[in-house]
Image (cartoon, rainbow, N blue to C red):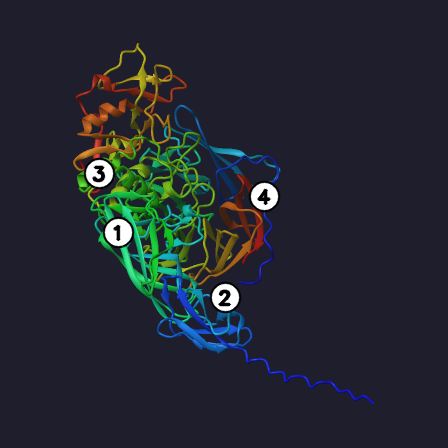
Amino acid sequence: MAEMQKIQFTRVPGEAPAADSLRLMRDKGGVLLVVSRTTPTPPLGANTVFSAFAPASPGAPWSVLAQVHEVVPAQPAWDVAAGPDGRPEIVYEKPGGAINALILRNAAGETQPVSAAYPLQSFSAPRFARPSGVPPAWLTAIADNRTCVAFPPAGSAAYHSLGECAEGLLVKTGVGFVYLCKTRVPGPVRGNLLSPGRIHIAALDAELRPAGPPVQLFGGIVYEFDADIIQGRLVVLATTPKGVMIAAGPAQGQATRLTSLEHALPVALTSPAIVAGPPGKAYLAALDAARVVTAEIPVP
Amino acid sequence: MHECSAAPAPPVSPPPPPVPGNLVVTVIDDGDGSKVTGITVQIQGPQNSSAPTDGSGQASFRGIPTGPYTITHSDPCFTSATTNATVQPAQTATADLHVRQIHAVLQIKELTYSGNNVVEKDTTGNFSSPEWVDGRAQADQAPVSYKRGQNVAFTAKFKVTTAPCRAEAVAVKGSATFGSASLEWTGTVTVNPGDTEVSVSLTSNNPLPNAVGIFEASDISWQMNPVSKGWAAAGATRNVLYVTLDNPSGTPNYWTLLDVSCRAAQGETTVSGLISKGFSGLTGRAISRKRDGHDLTYWNPANTCTATNTALLLAAANGAGQCGSWAEFLIDMYKAHGITTADKILIVRTQAAFAASSEGFLVKHWVFDHPPASAASAYTHFVPPQCRTGVPLPGQHNASPPPAFYNHFIVRADGKFWDPSYGAGPFADQKAWENAAIDGLFRDPPAAAPPGTTLQTGFDKSLNANTNILEFWNLTTNTKI
């Protein structure tokens, strides 16, 4: 990877809402930045508000993308992607108290259960397969805190197990996929419950079968990660104890051979997200003490 | 002329030669009162001389000039000593020179346990060896865990605070009492001149008590005895010792699990007893995480909560966990004692109802206002305003957990149901749990519900005490109970 300039994260202009988590997606209009905030609603449940902002239109206000009230006051993990109509779809955890279901919500507010075929299992940490900007081929989640599974993105269907993992993400690379998996390691958490872990990468074929052994992507500890295909390059962004790690390499062929570089930052970030930005650029976003920060870097 | 001449002086006889005297020095080892043989004694005075002590510990200086003498020795194996004596003519002066032989002096420095079950510091990694280190704060000494009835073994490292002048064997001994068991560790270590530390592997002469226990204040008192000269103190060590029913199986040996269970089930010798008394550690709903003392809560009294298993509960900064955390906490607590027969039980209205996210249950206490009349098997009330929450069932470190759930985890062990989230149980059967835990059911409001309705409630449990309105699923076997 070419020597990279220092990454400068800056807060987005205007009144951005305080946020618990953040994701990026690409739609027809370009980059869409989506954040969520969950607030208890005593005596019963919690309300989660999803707000969106288009960085390419800095004068445009934040808009409420969706609101979800749940009887059980858990902060849902979620992801967003362009649906078949090009508009944002959200997949989120519906907390039951003991086990979570996965719910897919389209831009019209219609919902459908994703995990209904598995009523005795709990699902967490849903992620749409990348690349962003196209309807995702799969969505992944962690079943029973143990196994990463991949669901077809529509309807309630059987899942495909990808193996033990604490957090997983699929990235489509030509005919196959790259599977990114974080495994937990002992150590202090960041924030309330961001466990330290190591990130591995493995090539899968079109049917999600292993096409090569998993390799460790980065020697150090990571907390959260995101990835996208940007100008034919697979780019991974992860938060680390020192700052962020960016790994990049060709998205075709030996897609698991990425070069990683860690960048020290003055503050701890959470919810790292990455998508293709303006031509030649990668667009990065994260949360800095609950506020949105973004950066643009040359495609690594 | 008168000649006069001085009379010749009488001849002066030369002074008699000085009469010498004798000096006999006895060298005494104050360590045991014995006479020291073979040590070279030096005298300084009118004459400087040296002589070794004989078999009686005496060095004799015969025919030495009289006068005051300073008596010393320079043997590095003995403490330095000085005394004085004055030799008189034709007399034998005596003096005692008091010394102590220099032996090795040891002080306990480290203990590295073996044969123990390593304790995990509540998701931040295993406690490392050595488990006890001199100078480390007592609170930072590592806890140690053994299965009951086992002998305790470790490598003891001693600091050599005084090295001997020649190699010598030093006996070491540690002794401690753990409940009804008195354990002693004995061994011998060779200490050479120049040694700064020595180590010896030791195993207790007796096993630990054959019952679950926790020993927080049992010191091992150390003694040393160089070349059988007598026992002397060599320091004390203290590690919190957890004694488990059996070796752990299938879970990290988390510190908090051990502490709660061993404290609650002290003296237990059976699986059934451990299950019952171990659970009593949760009935006070006052569990704190050992690594930082943070309260562990069932849900979060102030905010949302996401932890759903033991590891996440112990890792979370806010110490808050859902029922999955608490059910697995109990199951893992039993696993820490080798008990793997506890099952996780999922409670749902029905499988289909949860899949559709449409029905759940009301955790005590709810109030069904009348009218409308409540019913045993129908949805009758809208929330708000016809049905409202009352005084809630307290959960772990939380006086007011969420009042309604779609599903809940409890545990079945030893043929009974246990609800660790609320510290409640045991329950003989599903009916007992339902009557103790829930007041009815809820569902998403129908389209015809008044505006502002968040739930519709019914199936008043007080009218339904003999009928189970939920399903219990054993997640070990994926079968309905």
Residue sitting at x 16%, y 36%:
B415
Residue at image location 83% in from the left, 90% down from the top = B1
- Which subunit holds the residue at mark 1? B
Circle 2 or circle 1, nearest the eye: 2
Mark 4 — on which chain does it sit? Answer: A
Identify the residue under disc 2. B82
**Whole-percent x, y for residue B425 in the image:** 23, 30
| Same chain letter for marks 4 and 1 | no
Mark 1, other Cα within 10 Å: few <14 / some 14–19 / many ≥20: many
Q: Which of the numbered marks, if any, corresponds to residue A62? A: none
Q: Amino acid at mark 1?
A: Leu
Residue B275's tag is 3
What whole-number distance in Å separates the C-alpha atoms at marks 1 and 3? 28 Å
The chain holding disc 3 is B
Task: Report whether residue A242 is seen.
Answer: yes
Question: Do the residues bearing badges 4 and 1 touch, measured as CB atoms within 8 Å?
Answer: no
Q: Which residue is located at x 29 percent, y 43 percent?
A: B214
Q: Are marks 1 and 3 on the same chain?
A: yes
Disc 2 is attached to a residue of which chain?
B
- Which-is-in-front pick, marks 4 and 2? 2
Mark-to-mark CA distance, 4 and 1:
74 Å
Q: Is residue B352 above or below residue B81?
A: above
Query: Which x, y percent locates residue B445?
Result: 34, 22
- Disc 4 or disc 1, which is closer to the eye? 1
Of labels 2 and 1, earlier in sequence is 2
Label 2 sits on a secondary structure element that is strand
Residue at label 4? A56
Question: In which quarter of the view is residue B104 placed?
Answer: bottom left
Q: Position of residue A191 (x, y in %)?
A: 47, 42
Vertical arrangement, residue A14 with respect to residue A256, above or below: above
Q: Mark 1 highlights which residue?
A: B183
